[in-house]
Structures are given as C-alpha cells and as structure tokens.
Image (cartoon, rainbow, N blue to C red):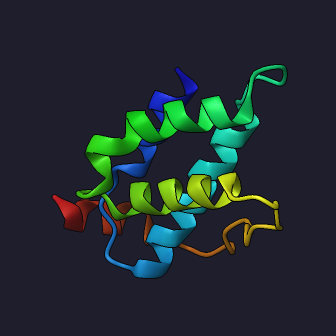
Amino acid sequence: MNLHRTLHMLQTQTDCQARVAELGRMGFMQWLGGLQGRASFARQAEIALLAAYRFRSSDPAVEVFCSLIEEALVMPPKPLDLALPEKRRRGGARSRRQLI
C-alpha cells in the first residue's frame, strides 16, 4: 500500500529537473520508512523496482526513485546523497490555477 502511494506521488508534473530529483529522493525516503524491519531489504527493493517498472520511462521522478534503490543495492554499501528539500514558496493557488 505504501509503495503504491509513493509511486502515485512521484507521477506529478514538474517543470524543473531539480524538483524531479527532490521528489525522487523524498519518495525513496518515504519508501525506506515503510519497509518491514525483519524482511529482506533486497527482496523489498526488487518488489519496488518491479512495481515501478512501467512508470520508469514516462515519469522522471520515478526514474530517480528507482536509481536510488539500485544504488542502495550495490555492495559494499555507501552513504547516499539524500537531503530534505529546501523550504520555498511554490506558487500557491495562483500557480495551481495556471496549470488548468
């Protein structure tokens, strides 16, 4: 359930490559937070990659998400470049109206 919600969140339209990377990182962190502690990380990663496969080529944020999962699977483990997004105004109601 959490994985599907994360993938749905990543399928948003954005005009900025930095925002795409930011969404992918946030999705990865959300997915990490929802993992089962006693289950195999590699198996859960495989399930996530299979679920995201059909969206990977059409949604850039999903591609970032999948790349982070693949990077996390590489041994030996190394720290990933993850950071929370910087606080900023994103346009509010005026910006949402322009999308319509």
Q: Is residue 98 left or right of residue 26?
A: left
Residue 22 on image: x %, y %? 56, 68
Quarter of the rendering occupied by the C terminus: bottom left
- Which is more toward the observer, 3 or 70? 70
> Which quadrant of the view contains residue 74?
bottom right
Image-based side of 40 in relation to 70, left or right: right
Q: Is residue 16 above or below residue 38?
A: below
Foreground: 10 or 69? 69
Residue 87: image location, x then y, percent: 68, 72
Establish if 52 lies above or below 24: above
| Residue 38 in picture, x, y percent from top left | 84, 20
Taking the view exactly as shown, the residue that stands out farthest to the front is 75
Q: Residue at x 72, y 65 (%)?
A: 84
Q: Residue at x 75, y 67 (%)?
A: 80
Can residue 62 be seen at all in this image of the molecule?
yes
Q: Is residue 84 above or below residue 48?
A: below
Q: Residue at x 21, y 68 (%)?
A: 98
Give x and y (percent) for residue 4.
45, 29
Between residue 58 and residue 6, name the one nearer to us.
58
Q: Nearer the viewer, residue 54 or 5?
A: 54
Q: Which image quadrant for residue 16?
A: bottom left
- What is the count of numbered marks? 0
Q: Residue at x 64, y 39 (%)?
A: 31
- Can residue 90 be seen by looking at this rendering? no
The single residue placed furthest to the left in the displayed view is 100
